Image (cartoon, grey):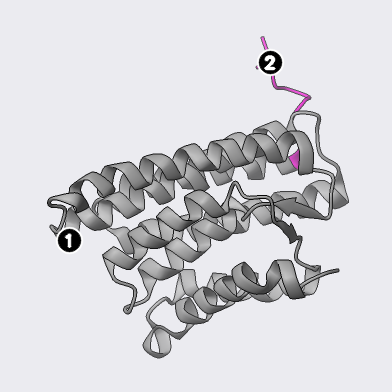
Amino acid sequence: MEPRFAGRFSLADSITLLNAALGFLAVIISFDDPSLGARLILLAAIADGLDGIVARYMGGSEIGPYLDSLADTVSFGVAPAVLVYSIFSNADIAFGIWQILTYAVPMLFVAAVVTRLALYTVYDIDDAYTVGVPSTLASTVISAGVLTSFVSPEALLGLTAVFCYLMIIDVDYPDLLPRDALLMGAIQVLAILVPTAFSGIFPIILLLGALAYLVFGPILYWR
């Protein structure tokens, strides 16, 4: 007897499942090694971009968009939230108001990601833009921030809190052109493979590039 999904999955769907698996791995590793957890989230983001390319050129499936949102919930919702929580747990600074925020902000982040992905799947999936900050972009900023040396745990928690709002606001973010996505992907690969090379320059470039798109994308970046 064959699995129910036999004949219904495409190659793109298999890559989407890899995205989800990497997200889960990031969750369980983040407590012991936040840096590796951040790199796994960035690797999941590459898989997330790759499944779209494969679906575009080789064809997808009817369940692809729904599978993608479910995988993104793990990799760009739960995994970054756990990563941020683990940073505070390891830093041993969760006391008073910080202790409340340490639980509340990651919880709200997951809720915002789930809300945003549901809206995206229903309303935005066939457009050349998306409404609200993409969860992959938020996760990239958080993960790159973990890999750099100048983003404090408090600043990281503050960024995560801001993303809870930015992901659900009514602002259009255009999809990256292929050349720009390839360039950012190359930097992302270097940040994953050699995060400390040249005084940690690649995570810094990735962070600055993601922040530039975050701030200026809706205004200056139009296809």
Task: Name the quarter where the C terminus is drawn.
Answer: bottom right
Side (left or right) of 220 relative to 26: right
Q: Is residue 100 magenta?
A: no
Q: Secondary structure at mark 2?
A: loop
Q: Is residue 41 above or below residue 192?
A: above
Q: Secondary structure at mark 1?
A: helix
Mark 2 is on which residue type? Arg
Q: Residue furthest top?
A: 1
Disc 2 to disc 1, C-alpha distance: 45 Å
Q: What are the residue bounds of the magenta stretch?
A: 1-11
Side (left or right) of 194 relative to 82: right
**Number of the label disc, if any, that sits on residue 91:** 1
User: Is residue 106 visible in the rendered structure shown here?
Assistant: yes
- Residue at 80% from the left image edge and 46% from the top image edge: 55
Mark 1 is on which residue type? Ala
**Which secondary structure is most common in the magenta stretch?**
loop
Label located before the other in sequence (2 or 1): 2
Q: Position of residue 82 (x, y in %)?
A: 34, 46
